[in-house]
């Protein structure tokens, strides 16, 4: 925890008067313009504060947990005020000050639970400006696409409840990338690397389902939250033998008229059953 606090303090020292954090670079490491303050760095910092708040609570420091949660909320408000903008006709996010082209990393806020602009962001991500038959462009008007930002976007859109639309595009992506001529892994980038396979991108594909479709988010050493949005044409779905949170357990999800039935079945025989309304986040402690 002291090392995490050191990192958070480093971020605090990079904040400007608008409450956003400066960064020398971003996820794309200078391949595209990122300005002095970019969306990716700030959203990742927001996610770090949320996770640090959960960790502090787990370690028994309630006061620090509350303070970190408040700091995260302040940063969230600053992100919306500074980066929120109409870009190419969509009320989504500008990637940096002066940015006038859509960028694929606008899906990252959804991954971290920031849904204020989710509808317009989804439209922008799947618009002609970013979506292509080969993948999602890094920037509107460019020829470069990265599976990393595409898979993060899909994970975030599942988190936001845009289940059926996202599933349609995930199916198209899977047929093109994993089941077609280029198999069996996700790729890093094109034209850079000539569609080189990369393990990180392939791991992100799995996370579109575990953390996206099922909405698993850790909150402690033996606790997590769930938002398992069932696609309209599915009656049930399951993840079996999940080895996490010091346990081996299954998550079984089924449709029950207007509600969703969730069963958490542990290998030791213990089980929990929850009827979910599809709105409130489900909190699980094993």
Image (cartoon, rainbow, N blue to C red):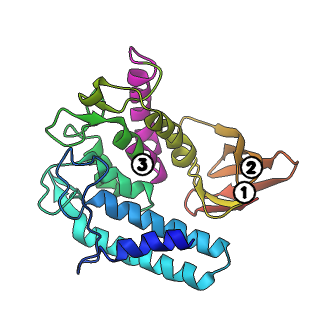
Q: Is residue 265 left or right of residue 56?
A: right
Q: Quadrant of residue 20?
A: bottom left
* Residue drawn at the location 29% of the way across and 75% of the way down: 15
Q: Is residue 227 left or right of residue 284?
A: left
Query: Looking at the picture, how far across and down is residue 278, in whole percent?
Result: 57, 56
Q: What numbered label is drawn on residue 274?
A: 1
The C terminus, quarter of image? bottom right
* Residue drawn at the location 47% of the way across and 70% of the way down: 49
The kind of secondary structure element at disc 1 is strand
Q: Earlier in the sequence, mark 3 or mark 1?
A: 3
**Residue pushed farthest bottom?**
63
Query: Looking at the picture, how far across and down is residue 199, in whole percent?
Result: 47, 33
Query: Looking at the picture, how far across and down is residue 54, in whole percent?
Result: 58, 69
Q: Is residue 115 visible?
A: no
Inter-mark Cα distance, 3 to 1? 24 Å
- Give the total number of marks visible in the rendering: 3
Residue that numbered label 2 is attached to: 263
The N terminus, quarter of image? bottom right
- Magenta-drawn stretch contains 175: yes
Residue that numbered label 3 is attached to: 157
**Which secondary structure is most common in the magenta stretch?**
helix
* Residue drawn at the location 66% of the way across and 71% of the way down: 58
Q: Look at the image and give the residue range highlighted in magenta.
A: 153-182
Q: Earlier in the sequence, mark 1 or mark 2?
A: 2
Q: Are marks 1 and 2 in contact (CB under 8 Å)?
A: yes
Q: Is residue 143 positioned above or below 114 on the image?
A: above
């Amino acid at each position: 925890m002291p090392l995490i606090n050191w990192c958070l303090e480093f971020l605090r020292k990079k904040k400007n008067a608008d409450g956003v954090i400066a960064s020398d670079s971003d996820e794309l490491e200078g391949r595209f313009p990122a300005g002095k303050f970019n969306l990716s760095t700030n959203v990742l910092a927001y996610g770090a504060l949320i996770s640090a708040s959960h960790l502090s609570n787990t370690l028994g420091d309630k006061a620090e947990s509350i303070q970190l949660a408040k700091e995260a909320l302040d940063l969230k408000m600053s992100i919306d005020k500074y980066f929120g903008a109409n870009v190419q006709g969509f009320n989504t996010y500008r990637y940096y000050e002066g940015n006038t082209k859509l960028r694929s990393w606008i899906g990252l806020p959804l991954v971290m639970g920031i849904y204020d602009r989710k509808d317009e962001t989804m439209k922008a991500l799947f618009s002609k400006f970013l979506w292509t038959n080969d993948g999602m462009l890094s920037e509107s008007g460019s020829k470069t696409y990265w599976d990393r930002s595409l898979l993060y976007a899909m994970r975030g859109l599942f988190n936001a409840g845009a289940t059926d639309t996202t599933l349609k595009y995930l199916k198209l992506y899977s047929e093109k990338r994993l089941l077609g001529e280029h198999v069996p892994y996700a790729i890093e980038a094109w034209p850079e690397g000539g569609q080189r396979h990369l393990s990180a991108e392939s791991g992100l594909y799995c996370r579109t389902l575990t953390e996206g479709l099922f909405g698993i988010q850790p909150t402690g050493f033996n606790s997590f939250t769930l938002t398992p949005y069932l696609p309209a044409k599915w009656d049930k779905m399951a993840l079996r033998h999940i080895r996490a949170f010091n346990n081996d357990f299954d998550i079984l999800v089924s449709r029950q008229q207007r509600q969703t039935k969730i069963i958490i079945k542990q290998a030791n025989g213990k089980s929990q059953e929850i009827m979910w309304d599809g709105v409130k986040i489900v909190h699980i402690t094993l």
